[in-house]
Image (tube, rainbow, N blue to C red):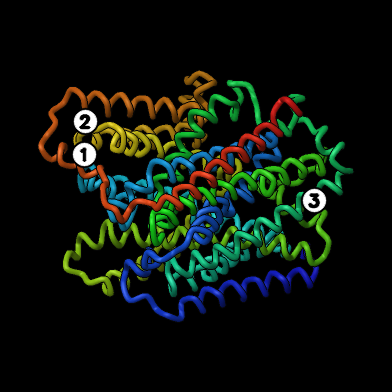
Amino acid sequence: MKIHLIDSLIILLYFIGIISLGLWISRKQAKGGREFFLANNSMKWPFIGASLFATNISSQQFVGQAGLAFSVGIIAGGFQIVGAICFMFLAAFFIRTYMGLKLATSPEFFEKRYSGRCRTIVSFVNLMIIILGNIAAALYAGALVLTNLLGWDTGENAEMMYWFSIFLIGIAAGTYTLSGGLKAVIYCDFVQTFVLVSGGLLLLYFGIKAVGGPSVMFAATDANGEPMWSLFRSWDHNFGWLPMLTGGMILGVHGHCTDQDYVQRALSAGSLYHAKMGSVFAGVLKASALFVIAAPGVVAAQYFQGQNTGVIDNAYVSLLTSVMPIGFLGLCLAGLLAAIMSSVDSGLCACGSLLTYDFFAKIKKNATEKELLKDGRIIMVILLIVCMFIAPCIRNFSGLFNYLLAVWAFLAPGVFVTVLFGLFYKKSTEKAAFVTLVLGCVLGLFAFCLLSFPALDGMKQMLPEFYQNKLNLSPVITLICAITMYSISTYGVRTDQDYANSLAMNIQQDDFEMTVEETKKYRRFMGVLVVLLLLVVGCFSPLFF
C-alpha cells in the first residue's frame, strides 16, 4: 500500500458516510418516476449548482484533465473556463424554454420542437456520451486510483484486482442512487463538492511547498519552452485559442446545455429562479476548478521533472501520495473518490430517466408513474453492469482525457446545430433536423474511428495536420451540419406542423418568470461570475506569464 492506515480509515469512513447519507435521504421512497428522476421539482439553487459542478468535474477531470495538464500545462484547464461560460449560456438562453415546455428529459425538447424520431436520435447520442464518457470513464478512473494506491496494480493478481475495484465503486455508487434517485444524488453531490474542492486546494498548497515555492513553480516550461502557466497558446496548438473557441465551445455548449445529466438537475428546480441561479453558481464553482484540477497537474510536472511517473493519468494520484501529510492525504483521496462516485451516480440517474421516458414510456403507453419507476430501476442495474465491462477498454487509449475529447467532440455537432436552430431560427423544419442529426452521427462516428484507431493511421495522415486535432475537425463537421440544416429549412417545404412546433417555443406562462427582486439577484450573481472569469483569465495570461 502507498498510503498510511489512518488515510485508509478516512477513505473507508467517507465511503460509509456518503452511502449512509444517500440511504438516509432515500428513507422516504419515491412514489413515481418523476419524483425519482426529477426530485419532485423541489430543489433549491445551492444544491443544484453544487450537483451540476460535481457531475461536471467528476473523475474524468481529476484523473484525465490533471494528466493532460501534466503534459501541456494549465491550458488543459481552459476547458473549465469554457464550461463556466456554457453554464452561463444554460441560465441565459436555454433553461426558461426547457422548464416552460415541462420537459422530463432534455431530448424531449427535440420531440416538441421537431418530432419523435429526432428525440430518439438525440436520446441515443446522450446515452452514448453518458455511458462511454461518464459512467465507464469514472469506473476506469476509480479503478486506476484504487489499484495504484493499494498496490494492486502489480503482481500476478493485478488484473483481477482491477476488475474488483471497478465492481466495488459501481456497487457503492449504485446503492444510494437506486434507492433515492435524483434527490439522493443531488444531496450527496452537495457534500462531495466541498470535499473535492477542499482536497484539490490542499494538494495545490502542499505541492507548491514541495517544489520549492511559487517562484520555482511559476518558472515551469513545457518541452517547447512555453510557460506552463499560461492559458494562451498559438492558434495552431492542439489546445490553442482557435481550437478552444471553436471545438471547445461546441462540445461545451452541447455538454452543459443539452446533455441529460446536466439538464436533469436544472429541471429539478422548484422555480425558474432556482434553476438559473443554480446554473450560475455551478459556473462560479467551475472557475475554481482551474486551481483544484489543472494547477495540481502542472505542479506534478514540475515535481516529477525528469522522472518516469508511468501513465499520465496517474499524475494527480502520484503527487498526492508524494507530498500530502498523513490525514490530509486521506481527505484528498476522499475528494477524488467523491468525484468518481458523483460521475457514476449522476450518469446512472440520467441514463435511467432517458431510457424510461424516451423509450419505455413510449412502448408502455399506459404505464403508471409507479411502473415507470420500477422499470427505471431495472434499467439502471443493467446499465451499471454493462458499464463495468466497458470501463477496462479505455486502457487502450492514450490517456483518459484524449479518449473523452474524442467521444464528446464527435457526438456533439449534430445536436449542437439542431438545438441552436430550434431555439433561434423559426424556419427550422423537422426534415432538416432529422437529416442533420443523422449526418452528424455518421460523420462523428467516422471521425472518431479515424483519429482513434491505429488501423486507420494511413487514412488519418491524408488529412492536413491541423485537422488531425479533434477540436479542429469537430468544427468542420459542425459547419457541414449547419449548412445542411439551414439549406433544407430555408429552401425546403415547411409544413403546418413545423409552423406549430416553432410557435411552441414561445413560452409565455407567468409560472416561468422571476420576480423583480429575483431578477436583480440573478443579474448581480451573473455579473460576479463574469468578473471572476475575467480575473482568472487575466492572471494566467501573457501579462504575467
Q: Is residue 188 above or below residue 474?
A: below
Q: Position of residue 421 (x, y in %)?
A: 30, 33
Check disc 1 and report the residue beneath it.
502
Drawn side of residue 134 relative to residue 489, left or right: right
**Label 2: few (<14), some (14–19) or many (≥20) C-alpha neighbours in 10 Å:** some
The CA distance from mark 3 to mark 2 is: 54 Å
The reply to whether residue 278 is visible in this rendering is: yes
The CA distance from mark 2 to mark 1 is: 8 Å
Q: Position of residue 50 (x, y in %)?
A: 55, 57
Drawn side of residue 164 relative to residue 105, left or right: right
Amino acid under disc 3: Tyr
Residue at the farthest bottom position: 27
Q: Is residue 259 above or below residue 72?
A: below
Amino acid under disc 2: Lys
Q: Which label sits on residue 212?
A: none
The quarter in which the N terminus is drawn is bottom right
Q: Is residue 122 above or below residue 12?
A: above
Q: Position of residue 22 (x, y in %)?
A: 52, 73
Dot 1 or dot 3: first in sequence order is 3
Q: Secondary structure at mark 2?
A: loop
Residue at the farthest left position: 496
Residue at image coords 77%, 25%: 225
Q: Which label sits on residue 427?
A: 2
Q: Secondary structure at mark 1?
A: helix
Check disc 3 and report the residue beneath it.
205
The CA distance from mark 1 to mark 3 is: 52 Å
Drawn side of residue 239 relative to residue 132, left or right: right
The quarter in which the C terminus is drawn is top right
Drawn side of residue 180 relative to residue 495, left or right: right
Q: Secondary structure at mark 3?
A: helix
